[in-house]
Image (cartoon, helix red, strand yellow):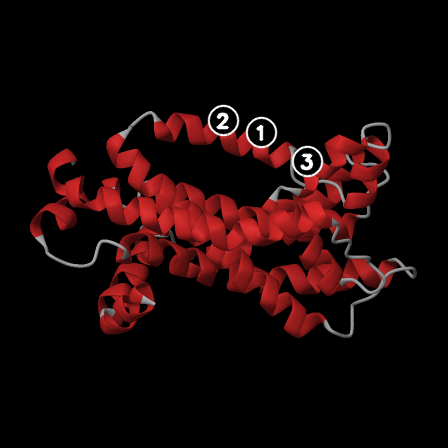
Amino acid sequence: MTLLRTIWTRRELLWNLTARELKQRYKGSALGFLWSVLTPLFMAVVYVVFLRLLARGVPMHDILIGVFAWQYTTQCVMGGMTSVTGNANLVKKVAFPREILPVSQICANGIGYLLSLLVQFPVLAVLLWRDPSAAFSPATAPLFLFWMVWQTLFNLGLAALVGALNVHFRDTQHLIGVFMSAWFFMSPVMYNMDFAKNLASQWPLALKLYYLNPAAVILNGYRASLLAGTPFDMPPAAWVGFWLVPAVLVLGLAVYHKLQRNFADLL
């Protein structure tokens, strides 16, 4: 609640930081914000055309949904990691709520994710049109919105956590790179849960541990909300992964709040 009050009272500062982040991202490019749409479009072409060779047996629409959602989390984590260190002059010279910094990264990347949906949905519609066994779910809008909000909360917790740790421990940026690569393969980005279940059929405990991954729950939720007939299994382990999202949010904000008092001295 304190964070929400801070965001509301400093909404103008938040908007300025978000706009600055978006402008710096495409500064000097001829197409500017158009890259927010073109980049996911080019990625979609690459994944649809070339990754079919690597992910045989997995429907391309599952891969497409997973890749776009994973990109959102990746951008938030990497942006959050430098949200404080990249604004050292601002932190040392201006008094303002430091929580605004990771929130501005989430807002900037959230806008980018919304723009990427302009590419994702048409490409997904074409893939579903070519596959008579698949179709959009009639409850797409409300369920997709819920999972997008749930993922955003998760991303904010991660961004705040790595942003604060990176100020105190500069090795964080190297460790996060390795962690994100390992997390990518342990999450159903390039495959769906049917593929994971078949692979782990001989190791039931491994499948239970797999459901503890919040990213797995979120990606499965996206696919179930968009694709008709896609089951959304929620065994007990998956419920733990589901509620790890607010736990990560609280942990990330708590660590950030505790460590922020030393930001100016360490930058």
Give the Cα separation between the discs numbered 2 and 1. Answer: 6 Å
How many marks do you count on the picture?
A: 3
Residue at the far front in the pictured view: 236
Mark carried by residue 209: 3
Residue named by callout 1: 182
Residue 55 quadrant: top right
Labels 3 & 1 near each other (Cβ < 8 A): no
Answer left or right for 28 relative to 210.
left
Q: Residue at x 50, y 43 (%)?
A: 74
Q: Residue at x 65, y 34 (%)?
A: 186
Residue at the far right in the pictured view: 132
Q: Is residue 176 above or below residue 110?
A: above
Q: Is residue 114 above or below residue 240?
A: below
Residue 3 x/y as whole percent: 31, 63
In the image, 67 versus 228, the foreground residue is 228
Q: Amino acid at mark 2?
A: Val
Other residues around mark 1 within 10 Å, as few (<14) / some (14–19) / many (≥20): few
Residue named by callout 2: 178
Other residues around mark 2 within 10 Å, as few (<14) / some (14–19) / many (≥20): few
